[in-house]
Image: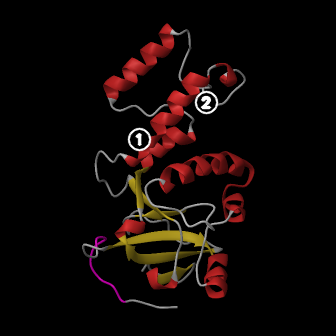
Amino acid sequence: MKKMNISGGEAMNGETVRLWTRQDEKSLEQLERNGVFHNKREYIEAQYEDIADHFIKLYRWFVEAASKRVPKPECVEFPIWCSISLANMLRPVEGTVCYELELPKDKVIYFDGSKWDYVLNHIYIPINEEDQLEYIKDLKRKGFKDEFNLYEGKYAHLYPLERKRIIDSWERIFQIDSWNEFVVQGNIWEIRPEYISKIQKFGDGPIF
């Protein structure tokens, strides 16, 4: 596996960027065996356990939306979540490894992690504060008590236009209003050996 000694900031040059990601330690075996690591459903299920189905459904939406921006290899099922800064990366815990990656910037799908929280909660992502106020007013005019339970719930199927309105708004996660390293995240479709500059296992000591 190729190792590169890299120093400097997250933006390596005009063509490549540096990212960090924590993955199941089984990813090392997949890299060794296949020469590439792809995220699998089993890893998501191991991470989220009883609520894995909730995340998987939303990841499938993300895959479809993200593929319009960076084409997805046919063999890939789920994206690989990455941090754009060392300060905000997930540290290794037992059973995991952390990768420091350098890869072409056109392989990265950047998105606003704070807006992703709206997706996780099945609610509308407003353009701004004014849009949020108008949205809530519109729901009240239509007789809805709040913005919840319109995407998924007992009566959600009765309001397909409201559900579509919510889903359409989720595209705004890719609109980054402020480049904050603690908010902006990057997703990639795969890890290849040539992307890897460092690997850190649980218990290795100070992070990178």
Quadrant in the picture for the C terminus: bottom left
Q: Where is residue 161 in the image (x, y as percent from the top left)?
A: 56, 23
Residue with the mark numbered 1: 172
The Cα–Cα distance between marks 1 and 2, rounded to whole angstroms, is 17 Å
Q: In this view, does 73 lie to the left or right of 48?
A: left
Q: In this view, does 95 lie above or below 88?
A: below
Q: Is residue 197 in sight in this rendering?
A: no
Residue with the mark numbered 2: 151
Disc 2 secondary structure class? loop
The dominant secondary structure in magenta is loop
- Residue at 42% across, 45% down: 173
- Residue at 55% across, 61% down: 79
Q: Where is residue 58 in the image (x, y as percent from the top left)?
A: 60, 46
Q: Is residue 129 magenta?
A: no
The stretch of residues the image draws in magenta is 5-11
At label 1, the amino acid type is Arg
Rendered image quadrant of residue 70: bottom left
Q: Is residue 161 above or below residue 205?
A: above
Q: Is residue 9 magenta?
A: yes
Q: Is residue 164 in sight in this rendering?
A: yes
Q: Nearer the viewer, residue 129 or 31?
A: 31
- Residue at 56% across, 37% down: 121
Count of labels in the image: 2
Q: Is residue 197 above or below residue 164?
A: below
Q: Is residue 38 above or below residue 50?
A: below
